[in-house]
Amino acid sequence: MVVNAPSLANIDLLEFGEKVQELYEAGIRFFHIDIMDGHYVSNLCFPTTVVRSLRQRYPDVELEVHLMVSEPRSYISQLKEYGADRVAFHLDATSFSRRLLTEIKEAGMKAGVVINPSQPIGNLSPLQDYLDYVVFMSVEPGFAGQKFLPGSMERLRELARLRQDGGHGFDIIVDGGVNYDIAEDVVRSGADIIVTNIYMVFNQPEGIAGACQRFRETLGAVKRDSVL
Ligand code: DX5
Ligand code: ZN
């Protein structure tokens, strides 16, 4: 079943601990953690220490770090020490993607790359043997709460086809603007993990527990299309 991965950047910082606990009690076992450096994107988000705090309190939650930073390599050892399970960096943040993917794996974490809306899906072909997962951006990175960009569904299917044709098993995480009008299609088109947001988990009238229940009910039985 498709995984519900709330993006913690959507939580009001003054309510952070409380909302994270609500997510946990609602059955969430996967957190999407955005780290920004103000250079790769013109915004700041969590410091790496949030990973340490989350790991200490939630030993059984998968912590996935989305690095929106210009020097991803310099974060790897600290993220490992603090307890991250997965780390992904942007394709254009390094000229040596294979080397960095290998370093992340050698550190004992799952390794991913993030592809932006303006980058050709084919850029991932040479990396397929090195990837544990791809974070597919359906918004421009940098801010939570944006709209799913037109054309993203077709690009997602292209990515899923590339995976199928290459016979690879990397996970696809869809990040940005997914809502219930399109979520079923996102799953049919190849998503394994959906980064959830103000449209699906936060700010919902039924509260976090109800919203997580709705995610399971709505998407639990949806299967990927066999012809992509
Ligand atoms: C965007 C971030 C996303 C974001 C997703 O820069 O990578 O993780 O928080 O949330 P929405 O879907 O609200 O954009
Ligand atoms: Zn993200």
Image (cartoon, rainbow, N blue to C red):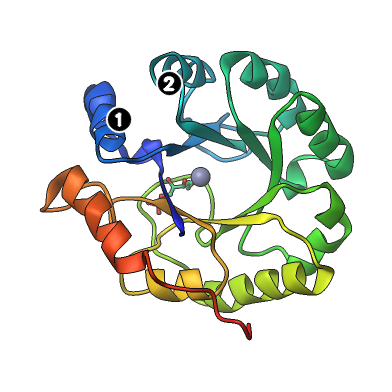
Q: Where is residue 98 drawn, in percent x and y?
A: 87, 43
Query: Where 206 falls versus 107 (above or below)?
Result: below
* Residue 54 disc label: 2
Give the residue displayed 39% in from the left and 47% down from the top.
144
Query: Where 189 falls versus 54 (above or below)?
Result: below
Tell me how far mark 1 sits from mark 2, CA to CA: 9 Å
* Residue 20 disc label: 1
Quick one: SS at disc 2?
helix
Q: Is residue 71 visible?
A: no
In the visual, does 161 lie left or right of 25? Answer: right
Q: Residues within 10 Å of mark 2 (few under 14, many from 20)?
A: some
Residue flagged by tag 1: what amino acid is it?
Val
Q: Is residue 79 visible?
A: yes
Q: Which of the two residues, 95 or 97, is positioned nearer the viewer here? A: 97
Q: Where is residue 221 drawn, in percent x and y?
A: 38, 70
Query: Where 53 falls versus 15 (above or below)?
Result: above
In the visual, does 153 lie left or right of 163? Answer: left
Instruction: Tell which circle, 1 or 2, labels the residue nearer the N-terminal end.
Output: 1
